[in-house]
Amino acid sequence: MKKNLVIAATIAAAAVCLAACDKALTETPETAPSGEEVTLEITMEDCSVDGEDTPDTKTIVKNTKEIWWEYGDAVNIYASNSTKADKFTVKLSSGQTAKTAKFSGTFSSSSSTYVVFYPYTGTATQSGELTTTINPNQTARAGSFDKNLMMACASFPAQKPGFTLKPVLGGLRFRVSRTDIKSVSVYANDGYGVAGEVKVSSLGSSNPSVTRTANSDVIATLSMSSGTFQTGVDYFIVLIPRTMTGGITLQMTTTSGKVLEAKSKKDVVVKKGTFGYFPKPINEYAVTSTPTAVDLGLSVKWANCNVGAASPEQSGNFYAWGMTTTMPSYQWKYYKWCNGTKNTLTKYNNNSANGTVDNKSKYSDYNYADDPARVNLGGKWRVPTNAEWQELIDNCTWTWTTQNGVKGCKATSKKSGYTSKSIFIPACGNMYYSQLKNEGTRGYYMLDNVTANTNSIYTMSFFVSQDYLGSFSGNSDRCYGSAVRAVQPK
């Protein structure tokens, strides 16, 4: 026996519209008995183009107002007296789309009130909550976001079935102007989760919420299934709504394997049903300039600024030893050359108690493949050796100063014929977990080797401060982040 329960609804997610539209209904269908197949006719109303090119735009596709259902869409429907998810699936064939589509399924129990959650997960609810996952590895779709990703929920009484699905996620909208970008990753500079496992609460309320769990992922990546991102086309990455204190970092991987990084230190707020935008293509925010090589009359030439910096005063990027990209949190859990702990090293290790032994300790041992200066700057740039830092100490006059509002040390050559040459080394601090430490008082800089003894989990740093104008620090975990000042041979 088949009964038709006709429901016209505003949908506000993935294959559903993110506009806060609402439509009153006049139909008063029957309460659906359990065990009977029911067809729900769900209409996706037009989205509003709410201030195009503003951070609060709620359209999911630029320059269009309509988002249509597509083959494979399904929703959870929960009776108010049950925690079980009943699956209702769109009645469209492969390749079909529709603005209004029928969803069919069977209620496991009859009820006067129902809760709807998109997309279908099959997850049981507990006290009006469910735990589900925002895929941190999302597939890019031109002009939209990954299928079944944008979550939305609502409730409706059986005797008055009009409802509006409320979006519970947000994200970022971006474009690129390079033709060789195949993936874009985003992480919050505060080190907290941006995707992965979440808890959705107050499913049937007018203000549902989503919060990360201890199992959330700190990086979300949007990748092409094949090829590269198209230029001049909008792409969307879905994230947990929250304030990302200290901003975000974008990492764009090219077909050659090079990673372009763009970092913003301003707080970023991800709102429900909102995709914040970037005014220009995101690759244009990345620092791609090559530093100037300064000849101080020494054995090597020194870069005039840090790796990832556009001027001598900028901090640039912070790198864990042996990594060529930045990290969402500088700890062993996210370090590339271990399996989550300091005793599970996989590279640059000479002690079996610390993991896999390769008896390597310097970047040159692997032809600079893991040298952040060589990988990011190219050419013959590389991280300085201990001896080259010592040469800089011994052959320069060091002055603690402020340059363009930034504190640091000025190293001026004492070599005959080069006394007019100098470099500025900012007191940019160092990264410990997701915290920037010592900014304005000290600057920690990478050496080209880990500690070549039984403690290869450690590395030393060169540092500058007002009290120690140029010196070497003690050992610290190599997963912590330091700045990089590059050198190149003459």
Image: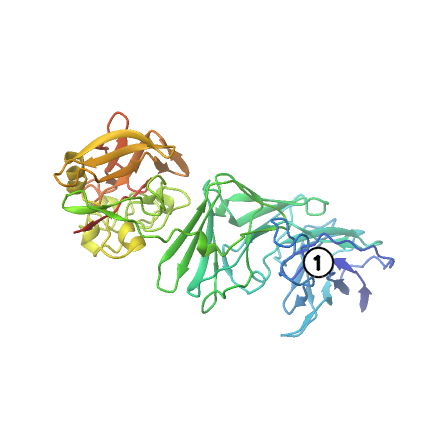
Quarter of the image holding residue 399?
A: top left
Q: Is residue 456 left or right of residue 402?
A: left
Point out residue 165 in the picture as x, y percentages from the top left corner.
Answer: 71, 53
Residue extending farthest left? 416
Point out residue 113 in the picture as x, y percentages from the top left corner.
Answer: 78, 51
Point out residue 82 in the picture as x, y percentages from the top left corner.
Answer: 71, 50
Q: Is residue 240 above or below residue 414?
A: below
Q: Residue at x 61, y 53 (%)?
A: 53
Quarter of the image holding residue 147?
A: bottom right
Q: Is residue 59 left or right of residue 21?
A: left
Colour scheme used in the picture? Answer: rainbow
Q: Circle 1 sits in a helix, a strand or a loop, which is it?
A: loop
Q: Is residue 114 left or right of residue 137?
A: right
Q: Is residue 291 above or below residue 146?
A: above
- Numbered-mark total: 1
In-front residue for pair 126/326: 326
Q: Residue at x 85, y 54 (%)?
A: 159
Q: Quarter of the image containing the N terminus?
A: bottom right
Point out residue 43 in the picture as x, y percentages from the top left corner.
Answer: 75, 63
Q: Is residue 188 above or below residue 438?
A: below
**Residue 346 shows up from this direction:** no
Question: Dot 1: within a 10 Å radius of its alpha carbon, few (fewer than 14), some, or many (20 or more) residues?
Answer: many
In-front residue for pair 228/474: 228
Q: Amino acid at mark 1?
A: Cys
Q: Is residue 403 left or right of residue 392?
A: right
Q: Is residue 97 above or below residue 349?
A: below
In-front residue for pair 4/278: 278
**Residue 296 shows up from this direction:** yes
Q: Residue at x 33, y 45 (%)?
A: 319
Say which residue label 1 marks.
47
Quarter of the image holding residue 385?
A: top left
